[in-house]
Image (cartoon, rainbow, N blue to C red):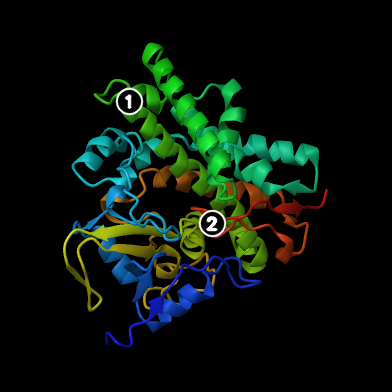
Amino acid sequence: MGESLHTVTTLPTTRRPGCPFDPPAELTDARRHGPISRFTFPGGTPGWLVTGYDLVRSVLADPRFSSRKELMRYHPTIDYGEIEVPPAPPGEFLLMDDPEHRRYRKPLAGKFTVRRMRLLTERVEQITTDCLDAMEKTGPPADLVTAFAKPVPAIMICELLGVPYEDRGSFQQQVESFMSGEASDEELLAAYTATQAYLGELVAAKRANPTDDVLSELTDSDLTDEELRGISLLLLAAGLDTTTNMLALGTFALLRNPDQLAALRADPALADRAVEELLRYLSVAKTFMRVALEDVELGGQTIEAGTTVILSYHTANRDPERFADPHVLDIRRKNGGHLAFGHGIHQCLGQQLARVEMQVAFTALVNRFPTLRLAVPAEEVGLRPETADIYGVKNLPVTWDV
């Protein structure tokens, strides 16, 4: 088996023309050869690429695989050579293992419960209505990204962090600069530094004058200012870019599948199932990494200690051994269990908020604009580069009848 094992030498950076929702063909092909492939990092360092659902899920649940940033080749396109990767900054617990991970996550867990997030539904509905009112008032055409997909999660995350209203415009612009995947190294560093500085000021302000928000509540814990800044940055990165791109790319997918759009419009009760299916079908958070802490048998292969494993969420969520007709968008699909929010101890903390935002937003959008359609040919919609951490569209020109 070892001789015939499929090998991938680089992560593909483009998707097939006309297939903006499907994983790159090379990754789908790798999964067809089997759920695990050899991978070669830049510089020739060996690693592994896991593309099958069951194996991805098992790695995510296995404590023998670490999330610690300093142990892995964190970016699959960089030749690290002799570079010594530093540990994740304080508070950024996505790239940590227990017990450090648990220490940061535990104070937050009670603030993102299903019940608490459902209590926010009314606020999400108001924000959504305000965005749709503004779209309707301005009239077609509109860029759905700037008019709708960005503002809904941006306002929600700013309110959760307690960002003052007057700061939100510049704050969101800074964040967008280092999440777009298109900034130069200099622009990236400048935007990241500015965002870190702002969050530091925000933490200090909440300590001095707490308000009604999650960040203020966290100032009652034993977390330091530096740790709170790191947690804030993580919440921002995890809660803004992901949902923005799910709303925009999800609308694009619905517009390209008019039967599914019509089904959602005809039956709002399908909203929950539609959101789960779009999460599976699109998998905007495409890949994550783990590193073996010891030799581990996985899919008939020995993953040696210290070896980095790339987990391909978008092929796992399209695995035909787990999902029937996986390349078909079917909002009536009943078998859930997708990995769009991950699995195991690092499963997305804000997933319930994301669900509420998407359920409300998609339902309101398709019902407010029953004639919504693309304003340009589908192939002219600008897609984010595959190098961006989160996949999506740069813009989505839409129009409707008035």
Give coordinates of residue 316: x percent, y percent. Answer: 40, 69
Q: Tell whether 266 sits left or right of 160.
A: right
Q: Is residue 66 above or below residue 241?
A: below
Residue furthest right in the image: 402
Q: Residue at x 73, y 41 (%)?
A: 135
Disc number placed over residue 9 in the picture, else none: none
Mark 2, residue position? 391
- Secondary structure at badge 1 equals helix
Q: Position of residue 310 (x, y in %)?
A: 36, 63
- The quarter of the image holding the N terminus is bottom left
In front: 371, or 162? 162
Is residue 320 something one can see in this rendering? no
Mark 1 Cα shell of 10 Å, populated few (<14), some (14-19), many (≥20): many
In this orientation, which residue lies closer to the viewer: 39 or 239?
39
Q: Inspect the image, locate mark 1, and give the three-letter code of the amino acid beneath it.
A: Leu
Q: Nearer the viewer, mark 1 or mark 2?
A: 2
**Secondary structure type for disc 2:** loop
Q: Are marks 1 and 2 in contact (CB under 8 Å)?
A: no
Look at 29% across and 48% down and name the residue there.
Answer: 70
**Side (left or right) of 129 relative to 53:** right
Give above or below for 88 relative to 340: above
Disc 2 residue type? Tyr
In percent of the image, x 32 and y 25: which residue is there? 218
Lower position in the chain sequence, tag 1 or tag 2:
1
Residue 66 in view: yes
Identify residue for label 1. Answer: 218
The image position of residue 339, as x and y in percent, is 38, 60
- Give the farthest residue toward the top: 208
